[in-house]
Amino acid sequence: MKSNLNDMVADEFLNSQTKEGTFKTYKTQMKQYLEFTGKTGQELLDIKRNDKDFQVETTMFGYRKFLLGKGKSENYATSSIGAIRGFYSYFRMPLQFRRQESRKLTEKNRSTTDYVFDKEDLSKMALSGSLKERCVLLVGKSIGLRASDFLTLNFGQLRSLKLEVEAPIALGEIATSARANA
C-alpha cells in the first residue's frame, strides 16, 4: 500500500496505516478533506500548530455540512471526521472537542421508520403463507419478542414443547436484549 496523493505529509499518514481497508478509506477521505480546505497536509499542520482559538475544530462542522450537502450519509461524515482526527493525532496534534461538539459531529438520525402492525395486519398475515410462516408469526406475536430477540430462539427450545396442552405453552425463561431507545 503506497499513497500517491502527492502530498508528503498526507502520504506519510496514509502509509502508516497497516490495514488495507483502513488505508483505502482514509485515502479517499483525506483527498476530500484536502480538496475541501484547499490546503496541503503541511499547511494543515502549521495552521493547527498555531491555532489558539480552536478554528481547526470549528472547521470540522463545516466539513460535515459539506459532506452531507454532497449527498453523503451521516455515517460517512462521521467516518470522514474520524479519519481527519486520526491525521491530526498521528502528528501529535489531536483535535479537542467539547462533549456537546463531539455529540453534534457524530450525530446520526435514522433513515428508516418502523412499521407498527395492528391487529388487522397480523390477522391477514396469519391467514396467508405456509404453515411454518404462520407459526413463526403467531409465536412471535404471542411471546411479544422483538425481531432480534425472536432470532435467538433455537430448535432445542421448541423441540421439547408439549403441544397437546392448552395455550399458553411455556417456552421457559428467555432473556431479551435491552432496547436501544426505550
Image (cartoon, helix red, strand yellow):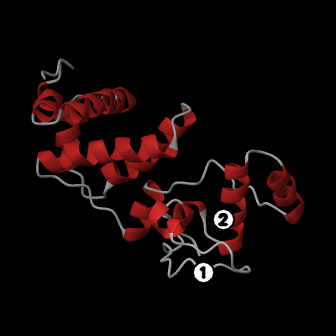
Element assignment for label 2: helix
Q: CA distance from mark 2 to mark 1?
A: 13 Å
Tell me the kind of residue under disc 1. Ala
What residue sits right under mark 1 in the picture? Answer: 170
Q: Is residue 12 above or below residue 112?
A: above
Element assignment for label 1: loop
Contact, CB < 8 Å: mark 2 with mark 1?
no
- Residue 68 is marked as none
Left or right of 18: which side holds 68? right
Left or right of 122: which side holds 142? left
What residue sits right under mark 2 in the picture? Answer: 140
The picture quadrant where one finds residue 23 is: top left
Left or right of 56: which side holds 64? right
Tell me what residue is drawn at x 48 percent, y 36 percent.
Answer: 67
The percent coordinates of residue 102 (x first, y second) are: 39, 61
Tell me what residue is drawn at x 67 percent, y 66 percent.
Answer: 139
The quadrant of the rendering that contains the C terminus is bottom right
Tell me what residue is drawn at x 26 percent, y 48 percent.
Answer: 85
Tell me what residue is drawn at x 37 percent, y 44 percent.
Answer: 79
The percent coordinates of residue 57 (x first, y second) are: 34, 53
Tell me the kind of residue under disc 2. Gly
Classed neighbour count for the residue bearing mark 2: other residues with Cα under 10 Å, few (<14), some (14–19), many (≥20)? some
Give the number of marks: 2
Classed neighbour count for the residue bearing mark 1: other residues with Cα under 10 Å, few (<14), some (14–19), many (≥20)? few
- Front in this rendered view, residue 31 or 118: 118
Q: Is residue 138 above or below residue 132?
A: below
- Front in this rendered view, residue 57 or 129: 129
Q: Is residue 21 above or below residue 171?
A: above
